């Protein structure tokens, strides 16, 4: 009997056990909702917007393609290491091949095809996501500023003024809106009616920001002098956290807001509440170039008496 056979057999058993455990873990997790959505933010009781399925499908498809490429690459590397290693007793190194034309062609063609396929699906989905119908049910004017957000309810001619949080790290459970993580009662809250097509018009008064609601699985840049827009339809009532995803200055981390997707009745009640507070009319969304000379980098955001 070969002296290394028992050791080799034990090694095979260990490898086989590790593979079996990995397969079992993957199989047990594949049915979970979190795995199906690629560990993106989401809820088991329904999609948050009408774009959730599209974005999730693109995300999962990209990861599956990346994993397949990774497995093939690692497989080829391990095979080459094992098949072409210098074995005990060899008097010379294995044959060193300088080039192999079929492999060279494959290394060139396959990456190009992969990039083109990824570009096609990404362009298709992003074009659909950014498509603006021109006839939304509700139009929201989002105005970024250092370091908060103002919201104009364009159809209803009312507005909400945002004031920056002073110490995000001191939030407690009592400060959360409806117990939703990442929210703060002191932050501006954007109300959206469920089941309605919402158009977001994005502008900024100073530097570049980025409007991001993680639960919506989408963010859009807010660029000085270059308005952006996108549409979506909220499908799930709930409270969600929003933030700026573009480093915009000293208090960037405090540039937070809340989003509440509510029934039509609750939405209209919120509009009437804003009118009762005197918050009628629309706030200016004009880009002030004079604020971009560095003088306002440390200024606090506008309060309710400013910018109206």
Image: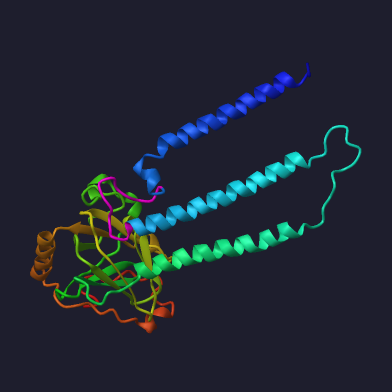
- Segment colored magenta: 39-52
Residue 202: which quarter of the image?
Answer: bottom left
When the figure is inspected, residue 6 is found, relative to residue 281, above or below; the finding is above
Furthest residue to the front?
102
Q: Position of residue 135 (x, y in %)?
A: 22, 75
**Against 98, is 21 above or below?**
above
Q: Quadrant of residue 297?
A: bottom left
Residue 187, quarter of the rendered image: bottom left
Give how far across and how far down residue 141 sits, in percent. Answer: 25, 73
Q: Residue furthest top?
A: 1
In the image, residue 149 lies in the stretch drawn in magenta: no
45 magenta-colored? yes
Q: Quadrant of the N terminus?
A: top right
Instruction: Out of 305 and 69, give the one closest to the viewer.
Output: 69
Q: From the viewer's perspective, tell me whether residue 5 is left or right of residue 39.
A: right
Number of on-image labels? 0
């Amino acid at each position: 009997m070969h002296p290394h056979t028992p050791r080799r057999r034990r090694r095979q058993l260990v490898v086989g056990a590790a593979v079996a455990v990995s397969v079992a873990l993957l199989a047990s997790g594949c049915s979970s909702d979190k795995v199906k959505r690629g560990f993106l933010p989401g809820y088991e009781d329904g999609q948050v917007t009408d774009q959730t399925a599209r974005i999730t499908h693109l995300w999962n498809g990209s990861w599956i393609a990346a994993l397949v490429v990774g497995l093939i690459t690692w497989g080829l590397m391990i095979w080459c290491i094992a098949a072409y290693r210098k074995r005990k007793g060899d008097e010379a190194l294995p044959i060193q091949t300088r080039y192999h034309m079929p492999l060279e062609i494959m290394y060139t063609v396959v990456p190009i095809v992969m990039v083109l396929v990824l570009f096609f699906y990404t362009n298709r989905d992003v074009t659909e996501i950014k498509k603006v119908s021109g006839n939304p049910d509700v139009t929201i004017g989002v105005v970024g500023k250092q370091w908060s957000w103002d919201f104009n309810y364009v159809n209803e001619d009312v507005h909400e003024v945002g004031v920056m949080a002073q110490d995000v790290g001191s939030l407690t459970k009592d400060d959360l809106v409806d117990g939703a993580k990442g929210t703060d009662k002191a932050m501006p809250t954007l109300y959206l009616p469920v089941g309605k097509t919402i158009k977001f018009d994005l502008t900024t008064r100073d530097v570049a920001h980025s409007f991001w609601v993680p639960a919506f699985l989408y963010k859009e840049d807010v660029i000085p002098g270059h308005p952006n827009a996108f549409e979506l339809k909220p499908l799930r009532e709930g409270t969600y956290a929003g933030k700026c995803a573009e480093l915009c200055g000293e208090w960037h981390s405090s540039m937070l807001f809340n989003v509440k997707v509510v029934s039509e009745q609750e939405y209209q009640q919120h509009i009437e509440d804003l009118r009762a507070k005197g918050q009628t009319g629309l706030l200016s969304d004009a880009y002030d170039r004079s604020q971009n000379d560095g003088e306002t980098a440390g200024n606090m955001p506008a309060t309710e008496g400013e910018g109206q």
